[in-house]
Amino acid sequence: MSVITPKSEAFLKQYLNNASPTGFESSGQKLWLDYLKPYIDEWEVDNYGTAYGVINPGQDYRVVIEGHADEISWFVHYISDDGFINVVRNGGSDHMIAPSKRVNIHTKKGIVKGVFGWPAIHTRHGEDAKLAPKTNNIFIDVGAKDKDEVLEMGIHVGCVITYEDEMMILNDRYYVGRALDNRMGGFCIAEVARLLKENGKSLPFTLYVVNSVQEEVGLRGAEMVAHTIKPNVAIVTDVTHDTHTPLVSTKKLGDVKGGNGPSITYAPAVHNKLLDLIIETAGEMEIELQREASSRRTGTDTDAFAYSNGGVPSALISLPLRYMHTTVEMAHKDDVDSVIRLIYEVLLRIEKGHNFKYF
């Protein structure tokens, strides 16, 4: 039976539909905190917007569960005299999917609607038939007659741009939308806090439920908050690639499939004893796991926590995701449920002063 309730799913829809681009995460963080507050004792927001709830404050032993709040987006980079807008990335935005997408341009005057335009197929002949989207040729059309009208709308260089879309559930099986990477992680850790509260569980340590900012541009939010909290243990959840779709090589990228459970990662930043505890817990609770290996870095906030404060035992629990960094990211509902249950059960097995020393 799923631990996700109808109320939880309603929050998830609202949370995913809200824009939370890197560096501009405040509205999403407010939604997340409002949902989390009934299940925590205290909360904080740091100078750059990382938000966290605190359960059982004041203990010497500190455990973090973490996801990241920010989504990829674009910045207005240049406005032509005839009113078209060129862009630069904010995070790892995929220029290949941009043409024909509807967008929201965030201004001080509010949202301005626009579209990524593209020459019609009828106009592309000969060499023009080879035309492909590139970061230096995609453009946004807001229906303006010239640059002055664009400026009058409140649009200027530096305005952030997000895609316009809404979450849906596909075949009663997959959550679909933009920014499942990684607001789904924020959802999962909030659900862990809810379960602890509703099940009346007392922890022998202080738990920090952390939703970090600026992961998409270098793990910056996690880097900052790790130095603030100084945790003894960190469990990070993020997304990983579901490699069982066309045009993706399992041999190159690993063998991970949506619906087959969360994925755990072996990597230098992942602490072996903490990973063993996660694997043992999954076995006890009959939660199916998949496995990956990263040769140097995980590329997630795990790295930021692990290498902070003289070394923090850290581990990564990943949610398989199809079509990462597109507007149709897909996560299996069973995997989301399993990530929540696994983190919850691991926390119940961490004792105060738990010994994760190397040997």
Image (tube, rainbow, N blue to C red):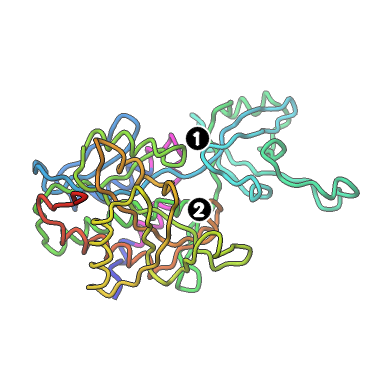
Quadrant location of the N terminus in the rendered image: bottom left
Residue 85 found in image quarter? top right
Residue sitting at x 57%, y 67%: 245
Number of the label disc, if any, that sits on residue 27: none
Q: Amino acid at mark 2?
A: Arg
178 sits left or right of 58 in the view: right
191 sits left or right of 159 in the view: left
Residue indicated by mark 1: 110
Residue 20 found in image quarter? top left
Badge 2 density bin: few <14, some 14–19, many ≥20, Cα 10 Å: many
Q: Is residue 25 magenta?
A: yes
Number of the label disc, if any, that sits on residue 178: 2
149 sits left or right of 303 in the view: right
Q: Which residues are magenta?
A: 9-27
Q: Secondary structure at mark 1?
A: strand
Residue occupying the far front of the picture: 359
